[in-house]
Image (cartoon, grey):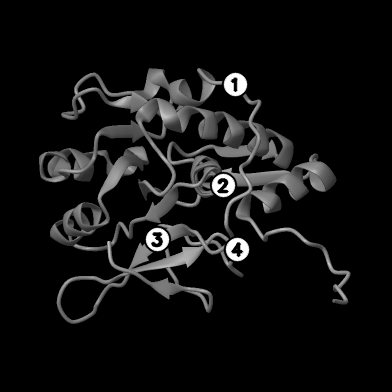
């Protein structure tokens, strides 16, 4: 058999970040924080923190295939979550915050999200829904410990920065099956309840975000 001479390795989301760190490590990622100021750091910084978060996920009981929900804008922490979750073998479930609260609760329960990570701007919404989210075992606020509210209304609320900084940045991204699910989003404005759709671990052409959830040509409809 005559074998082709193209690269023989799976196409993984984690490879995008590894490549960026290796060849564009000093390039800046610039985003506006929920608190207001502009945040700047490099791809090298982002890759390091994504590895720390990947190490932290098992401490929350996250196993491969578990869904991690996010209610967050396009900030640097959400960027880290996308790579850490999908790159480690779990499924990043970006939830559209513009849906009605009852739809958001239905979606999180239907996906059986084990962890919900969210920006401070969504704290009142999450506090309102927390008792209804039966599958969620841990709530993580994308903030430092100093920014945790004294009374959030959410028991055992976790600081994202505490979670990340308490773990090592030494992590070997697993060589996943490129057909494994990596990201999950739900439709809106459809007949009946929203429908879930997964993208596979092979990187799509665009990153799915909470602000605008889109499916791409590699999507495969699944039932959770």
Label 4: few (<14), some or many (≥20) within 10 Å? Answer: many
The structure residue drawn at horizontal position 30% and vertical position 57%, both measured from the top left corner, is: 97
> Which residue is disc 3 drawn over?
184
Q: Earlier in the sequence, mark 2 or mark 4?
A: 2
Q: Earlier in the sequence, mark 2 or mark 3?
A: 2
Q: Is residue 79 above or below residue 181?
A: above
Label 2: few (<14), some or many (≥20) within 10 Å? Answer: many
> Which residue is disc 4 drawn over?
202
The structure residue drawn at horizontal position 43% and vertical position 51%, both measured from the top left corner, is: 92
Given contact means CB atoms under 8 Å apart, are the residues at marks 1 and 2 in contact? no
> Which residue is disc 1 drawn over?
168
Q: Earlier in the sequence, mark 3 or mark 1?
A: 1
Q: Nearer the viewer, residue 74 or 70?
A: 70
Q: Is residue 36 above or below residue 11?
A: above
Please give left or right for residue 222 compared with residue 164 in the image.
Answer: left
Question: Spatial distance from mark 3 to mark 4, Cα to Cα?
Answer: 14 Å
Q: Nearer the viewer, residue 73 or 130?
A: 130
Question: Spatial distance from mark 3 to mark 1, Cα to Cα?
Answer: 27 Å
The picture quadrant where one finds residue 42 is top right
Question: Spatial distance from mark 2 to mark 3, Cα to Cα?
Answer: 14 Å
> Which residue is disc 2 drawn over?
87
| 3 vs 4, front mark | 4
Question: Spatial distance from mark 1 to mark 2, Cα to Cα?
Answer: 16 Å
Q: Is residue 191 above or below residue 132?
A: below
Q: Is residue 43 above or below residue 150?
A: below
Element at label 4: loop
The structure residue drawn at horizontal position 58% and vertical position 67%, both measured from the top left corner, is: 204
Q: Earlier in the sequence, mark 1 or mark 2?
A: 2
In the picture, which quadrant includes the N terminus? bottom right
The numbered disc on residue 212 is none
């Amino acid at each position: 058999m005559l074998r082709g001479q193209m690269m023989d390795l799976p196409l993984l989301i984690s490879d995008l970040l590894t490549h960026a760190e290796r060849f564009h490590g000093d390039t800046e990622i610039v985003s506006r924080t929920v608190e207001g100021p502009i945040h700047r750091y490099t791809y090298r910084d982002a890759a390091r923190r994504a590895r720390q978060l990947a190490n932290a996920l098992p401490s929350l009981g996250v196993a491969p295939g578990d869904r991690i929900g996010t209610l967050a804008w396009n900030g640097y922490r959400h960027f880290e979550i996308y790579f850490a979750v999908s790159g480690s073998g779990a499924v990043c479930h970006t939830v559209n915050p513009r849906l009605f609260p009852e739809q958001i609760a239905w979606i999180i329960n239907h996906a059986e999200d084990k962890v919900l990570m969210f920006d401070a701007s969504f704290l009142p919404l999450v506090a309102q829904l927390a008792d209804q989210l039966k599958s969620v075992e841990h709530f993580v606020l994308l903030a430092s410990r100093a920014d945790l509210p004294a009374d959030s209304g959410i028991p055992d609320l976790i600081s994202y920065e505490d979670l990340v900084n308490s773990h090592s940045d030494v992590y070997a991204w697993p060589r996943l099956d490129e057909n494994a699910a990596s990201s999950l989003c739900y439709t809106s404005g459809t007949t009946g309840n929203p429908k879930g759709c997964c993208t596979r671990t092979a990187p799509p052409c665009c990153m799915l975000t909470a602000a605008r959830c889109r499916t791409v040509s590699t999507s495969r409809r699944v039932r959770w």
